[in-house]
Image (cartoon, rainbow, N blue to C red):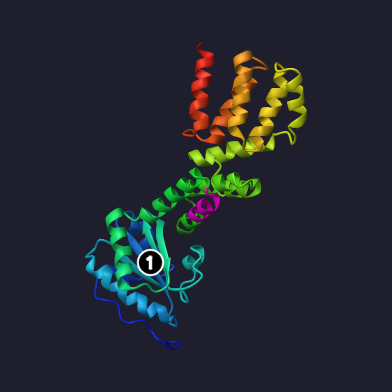
Amino acid sequence: MSLIGEKPAPSAKSEHIKDGTDASFMADVIEASRTQPVIVDFWATWCGPCRQLTPALEKVVGAAKGAVKLVKIDVDKNPGFAGQLRVQSIPTVYAFVDGRPVDAFQGALPESQVKAFVDKLAGAGGGGALDDLIAMGKESLEIGDIGGAAQAFAQALQIDPANLKALGGMARAYLSGGDLEGAAEVVAMAPADAKDPDLDAARAALALAAEAPSETAAFEQRLAADPDDHEARFELAKALAGLGRLQDAADHLLTIIARDRTWNDEAARKQLLTVFEAAGPTSEVAKQGRRRLSTILFS
């Protein structure tokens, strides 16, 4: 059992291991990680698990012979960057590559797991865990596992809160679950000029939802009476798009284009492009819809 005031074991003699501070964080971690992966160990003198983890980290990093660096930061003396990175318990370890966090873990791990963490960082440039989580989130979205997708993207955002792919994926997860407010909040976390396919899709879907009529029955009744009532079909398509029924919306818009390409200053074609964007450029809605649109326009 550790006592308050105890100090961790002395650092191994290695030029790749050093004590860091808030004042030196930018140079020791952010800038240094642009040329070499950097591991940051957030610890405190009173933390028992820290005394188990730090020696294992030092041993493994020393054995890596310069493949990675280790910077140890006492959170009691240097709370600034620990707060920015939302360190809520210690030990917490972050891995930085190219000036950004790419992996992390909390608690004392066995030396074998510490070695696997360091080896992965050294061999894969550090981006493995973050990329794996984003890929996992995308796969979960594709199979309709909204909860699994949200969990994966949330973990990715813990590693890198500003990652555009993770933000876009989380926004899509909220949209798939019908939570427009949550999606809007996530989109707002990204810079307005940030470009990412999933972010663009979320923005387009939110725009469609904002202008969608709340009911479909009246437009369906008008279409039943007159299949060539393009205004009713257009409003129905808008309502369906706002509900996330993008394929149905695209079908109605394509019907309008097939019957009258220039109706209402090509309103149907313009709306269709927004639907494609909301669905995503690689979606079946967009791919099949573009093929059908080309057939109509060039037939």
User: What x and y, as percent, mark residue 224?
Assistant: 74, 22
Q: Secondary structure at mark 1?
A: strand
**Amino acid type assigned to the residue bearing label 1 in the image:** Val
The residue labelled by disc 1 is 40
Between 197 and 286, the one nearer to me in the picture = 286
**Helix, strand or loop for the magenta stretch, by majority:** helix
At x 41% / y 78%, what residue is drawn? 49
Q: Is residue 73 left or right of residue 153?
A: left
Hey, which quadrant is residue 39 in on the image?
bottom left
User: What x and y, as percent, mark residue 150?
Assistant: 53, 53
At x 70% / y 28%, what residue is drawn? 236
At x 57% / y 41%, what residue is drawn? 202
Q: Is residue 11 left or right of residue 46?
A: left
User: What x and y, as percent, mark residue 64?
Assistant: 23, 65
The magenta region covers 145-153
10 lies above or below 94: below
Q: Is residue 227 left or right of residue 14?
A: right
Q: For the N terminus, which image quadrant?
A: bottom left
